[in-house]
Amino acid sequence: MSDSSSPLISALEQLRLKLLDLTARNRLINFKHTKGKSLQFVEGHPAAIYQNLVEANNKANINVFGLPEPARRDWVERSGRLERPELREWAKSVGVSTSYDISDAVEDSGESNIRALMYSDDLARHCRKIEREATLAIEETGANMLFLVLGFLEFPDQRDSNKTFAAPLISIPVSLQNKKIAGIQQFSLQYTGDDISENLSLREKLRNDFGMVLPELAEEQIDVNGHFAAIQEIIKNQPGFAIKHRVSLCLLSFSNMLLVRDLDPTKWPANGDKNSLIDHSIVREIFEGRADDGGAGLSFAEEHLVEEGPGASIPLVYDADSSQHSALIDVLSLKKNLVIEGPPGTGKSQTITNLIAACLAEGKKVLFVAEKLAALEVVKNRLELAGLDPFVLELHSNKTNKKRVLEEIAKRTTFRPKHSNDIPGLQQQLEAHRKDLKAYTDLINSIAHNAFGLTLHKIMWRAERHRMGLGNNENMLGQIAIGDATQISEFEFGRRMDCLGYLRSQYELIGDFDEFCTFWGFYPDLLIPG
């Protein structure tokens, strides 16, 4: 086993702590209800909610109710106007609790539907705003961030501190459904089927600051009351600690939790005396670097000849320029680990698509991961346009669940591609076009018909640039003929330009050739060099 005191293990631990974020900025440690992103409830038993939402065979929806609408006779006068009663007063009058701490009586009732301390129209507006925020989060990250939280742990910021934090205990990933019943918009919550994530930030915070170890959440069936009781047993003698039996709908991000688990070397199997994570060549290369031939640890991409060698046999489903093709050669043929950089629109996703297709052609499996959902969708759409969608399995998005994954696997196992008899002929055409393009490229990049050592490509572009610089005098080019133009060297060209410059200065010195000029009327037939 690798040395537990190695710098690499220390670096991994620092990364894990950074991902967990044990500061007060983390809502998983210091949760505060914010308008438009959270909703608190005054009714609903946590255990019954979990049972009906997650464990029930038909995965029942949980209805979200507001306060009963008061009749007009129950309205009260304020500032000369009739208005609905104040929320808490009306709730008490109709027998609805006004406390966000669920009472024992409500818990014993087994009520799974939840009620907010709001009138129905205000509740509908609030739910629509939360729904928009949740949809936006999915569009940006591809991950669902809407959770129904069952229970909070209240604890001091530090030992002997009067400042307290509240952290979510059980967070169920849900989606917000809405429909109209008798013209009234009704909202309900549905379990998405994703794993119920543990609050690892809270676990690490309590372990570091208080030496407490929270009980782990069960991976399958969670005994909500039993889990709360186990936590209560741990905190019973700790001042400032308390379990709050509250239910809240809110936006949370657990995206780092899986990364935190994956960066724990103890979760990885041992391979002899080596750990599968910290002794992996790529992991060591990321943390320790890799020296290039000069020992600097950095190197720039090398341009390869794509028409011959390993590059000629790489199958391309999209166009690739020489730099993109060279990147494919580095990965596929030279087995390099590399970073491809470039501004938007330079073909990075196109290169990734070609790389995935080439790996498929070699019978390899590819895991493509991106921070943004948009990046995943661009590559996925390109693969679909190339006809490779039967080989694409979407593992993580708001549309993905266990049922859909199984359906996609079944679809792939029954897929039988059509084989074309024209492939040999098409390959011959491809090879012929490739040879024609190479011949053209070789020609325009060849050095001929000049003593400057310029390629034909450079000559044409330089001539075009100078032609455009003439403006309206462009037609004068046809009146100039230089017989030995192809033999003029760069030195000779410079000498002639100096002569033209001298001639121009003399012309400007003489001035206009008119009746006021000293040489007006003088037209010599013969000039004898002085």
Image (cartoon, rainbow, N blue to C red):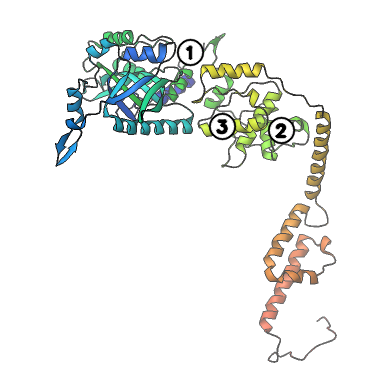
Please tell me which of labels 1 and 2 falls first in the chain: 1
Per the model, the C-alpha gap separating discs 1 and 2 is 39 Å
Three-letter code for the amino acid on which mark 2 is drawn: Leu
Image position of 156 (left or right of 38): left
Residue 343 placement: quadrant: top right
Q: Position of residue 222 (x, y in %)?
A: 38, 10
Q: Secondary structure at mark 1?
A: helix
Q: Amino acid at mark 1?
A: Lys
Q: Between marks 2 and 3, how big is the CA–CA gap?
A: 20 Å
Residue at x-position 51% and y-position 31%: 373
Q: Is residue 213 visible?
A: no
**Label for residue 377?**
3
Query: Viewer-nearest of labels 1 and 3?
Result: 3
Residue 104: where, in percent of width, then height? 23, 12
Q: Point out residue 391 in the picture as x, y percentages from the top left corner.
A: 64, 23
* Labels 2 & 3 near each other (Cβ < 8 A): no
